[in-house]
Each structure stands twice: as C-alpha cells, then as structure tokens.
Amino acid sequence: MIPLIAFVGLLFFWSKSYKMMVKQGIQSETSFAILSMTHWLLAFVYFQTIVSFQLDKDVEQKIFGNKLTLVQLWFHVLTCSYFTFDLAARFYKKQLSQWLLIHHSFTLLFILIAILYQSSGSENIYVLRYSTFCNVPMNMKTILAKKGMQISNPYHICNLFYAIIYSINFLYFLPLLLIQFYQSNTSILTFFMLLLLCIQAHYTIVKLHCPSFVSSIRYFKNKYMNEVF
C-alpha cells in the first residue's frame, strides 16, 4: 500500500514539475529532457547510496537470482513513476517516438516482471544503470536541437558522446550482464527481456547511431579542414 501511495505521489511530482516548466516558457520537449536527466540523477544517487551505506547486499556485491528486497522495490517505484509519466505525457502531447515507445515499454516490463514475481530486483537496477549512462548527452542533444544549435560544436560533441556511450553500454556492459544472468538463478523472463533489449539496441546502433556518429565526425572534419586551408 505504501509503495503505491509513493508511486502516485511521484507521478504528481513529475506532472507538477512539467507543468511548472511549461508555464515558465520552457518548451515541452526541453521540459521532458530536463525531467529525464532529473530522474537519472535521482536514480544514480539512490544507487550510490545503496552501495555506499551497504543497504542491500545483492546490489552492493552484484548478486543476481535472489528475491526482490524492499530497498530494490523503492528503486523500482521511482523508475516506474517516471517512465509511466513520460510515456503518458509524451503520448498526450503527441511527442512519443517509436524508439521511446519501445524503450519505455521494455523498462516498464522489466519492472512489472520484478514486482509480479518478486525477483530480479538487483538485475533490473544494473540493467537500468548501464542502459541510462548515456542519458545526459542524449538529453543535452535534444535541448541544443530545440535551441536551433544543430550546426554547432556543443551539439555534435553531445552527439558523439551519446553514440559512443550508448554503443559501449549495449555492446559490452549489457551483454556481460546477460552472461551473468544466464549463470545465476535469474528469472527466465528477465533474461529474455534483456536479450530482446540487446537485439533492439544493436539495431538502433546500426540504423541510427553509426550514421549519426559519422555525420558528427564529418562535421568536425569539414569545419577544421576548412579553417586550416
């Protein structure tokens, strides 16, 4: 009952924060980007608090296959509240891209499996941790684009960092987690969800990030070659 009340309270927090920013004249997509980075920061602080104060042995020692703990549940409540808000609000504002729909749906399914089966809490925390490392450059890229700075150094620097970090996460860290899940007592549903996420990410890297990365490299090459010659 208490986690449900907290979930509703956090939904109110995200909604109220969004409305306040829009009323201040901040563009809708920029407001979504700021809230995304806020969630990432809160999740990062929560994770570091768990590890620093040894609040959960499974998370601290990267142990998989055990039951969902109360500490892990609160992490899921925080994340579920944000992704539920973001999915619903972007859909209402007609700003929900196909990529975001897939990403948010995967995240919420991970959380739903953990809560329904009371397992995979530690696993989900690490999946979310690695898959959101690229959050800041991704959202800064969006903010800069909304300011009309697509042809600027900051935009292309964010674009490069976004593509590089995303690729490292999904080509190294998450496949490594997949192996660790296979070797533990991780729920078979969580294992297959991560497998699907990795497959989807590989497709995204090939179709979106590689061309985007090449575009930014070409931008810097053309700019500085022209300055030299």
Image (spheres, helix red, strand yellow):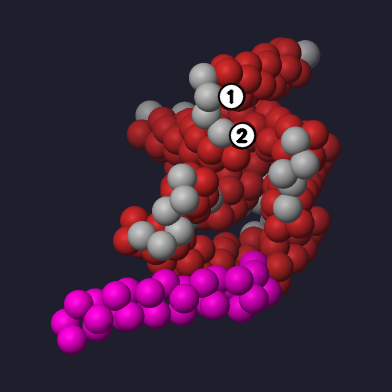
Which quadrant, please, contains the C terminus?
bottom left
Q: How far apart are marks 2 and 1 (CA)?
A: 6 Å
The percent coordinates of residue 114 (x first, y second) are 74, 41
Residue at which label 2 appears: 28
Q: Please, what is the three-letter code of the amino acid marked with disc 2?
A: Ser
Tell me the residue at 52%/72% (across/down): 212
Proximity of marks 2 and 1: CB atoms separated by less than 8 Å? yes
Q: Nearer the viewer, residue 111 or 36?
A: 36
Q: Which of 5 and 189 is in front in this view?
A: 5
For the view shown, which residue lies furthest in the bottom direction? 229
Per the rendered image, the range of residues in magenta is: 201-229
Amino acid found under the numbered disc labelled 1: Val
Residue wearing tag 1: 22
Mark 2: give few (<14), some (14-19) or many (20+) Cα within 10 Å. some
Q: Which element type, helix, strand or loop, lies under badge 1?
A: helix
Main secondary structure of the magenta stretch: helix
**Residue at (66% x, 21% y) in the render:** 15
Q: Residue at x 54, y 38 (%)?
A: 30
- Residue 218 visible in image: yes
Q: How crowded is mark 1: few (under 14 residues within 10 Å), some or many (20 or more)?
A: some
